Amino acid sequence: MAAGPTERTLQRLRREGWTAEVVERWIPQARRRRDLFGVVDVLALRGGETLAVQATSRSNVAARISKIRESDALPLIREAGWRIEVWGWARDSKGRWQVRVEDMSE
């Protein structure tokens, strides 16, 4: 089975020295996933840094940016000093996975 955006995000963060965990949860009754604070799929720690990531396909980056901008949690995440990024994954012309990172921290 191919790795999805969340798994690719975890792999990359861990390679870069982050301690990272998936923080979205499955709601069986609704048959859907619920992101932490409605906008975070992966939470990562490294040194004194906290990084919140919304992982998606490259084609959905704009929708995720809008979702985060409209979230009541965004000012709280920023106030806490966390970075928040959208990571959009797509294959390049040679079939390799590439990520587009959009920083929503400011």
Image (cartoon, rainbow, N blue to C red):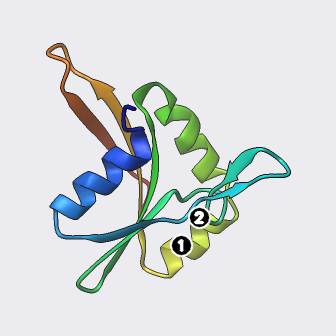
Closer to us: 84 or 14:
14
Instruction: Find residue 18 and report its horizontal and vertical position in percent.
Output: 25, 70
Instruction: Find residue 88 and report its horizontal and vertical position in percent.
Output: 38, 37
Q: Amino acid at mark 1?
A: Ile
Query: In this picture, is 36 found above or below 57?
Result: below
Secondary structure beneath dot 2 equals helix
Q: What residue is at 59 percent from the left and 59 percent from the top?
A: 24
Query: In this picture, is 7 found above or below 18?
Result: above
Q: What residue is at 59 percent from the left and 52 percent from the top?
A: 68
Q: What residue is at 33 percent from the left and 50 percent from the top?
A: 9
Closer to us: 13 or 48:
13
The label shown at residue 77 is 1
Instruction: Count up the numbered dots.
Output: 2
Q: Is residue 79 left or right of residue 13?
A: right
What is the quadrant of the N terminus in the image?
A: top left
Instruction: Find residue 50 and report its horizontal and vertical position in percent.
Output: 37, 76
Query: In this picture, is 56 found above or below 92?
Result: below
Q: Is residue 24 left or right of residue 18?
A: right
**Image quarter of residue 31:** top right
The label shown at residue 22 is none
Direction bottom: furthest residue: 48
What is the quadrant of the C terminus in the image?
A: bottom left
Q: Is residue 54 left or right of residue 9?
A: right
Q: What residue is at 40 percent from the left and 29 percent from the top?
A: 58
Alpha carbon of mark 2 to alpha carbon of mark 1: how far? 5 Å
Note whether residue 55 is visible: yes
Residue assigned mark 2: 74
Note whether residue 102 is visible: no
Mark 2–mark 1 CB contact (< 8 Å)? yes
Q: Residues within 10 Å of mark 1 (few under 14, many from 20)?
A: some
Q: Amino acid at mark 2?
A: Leu
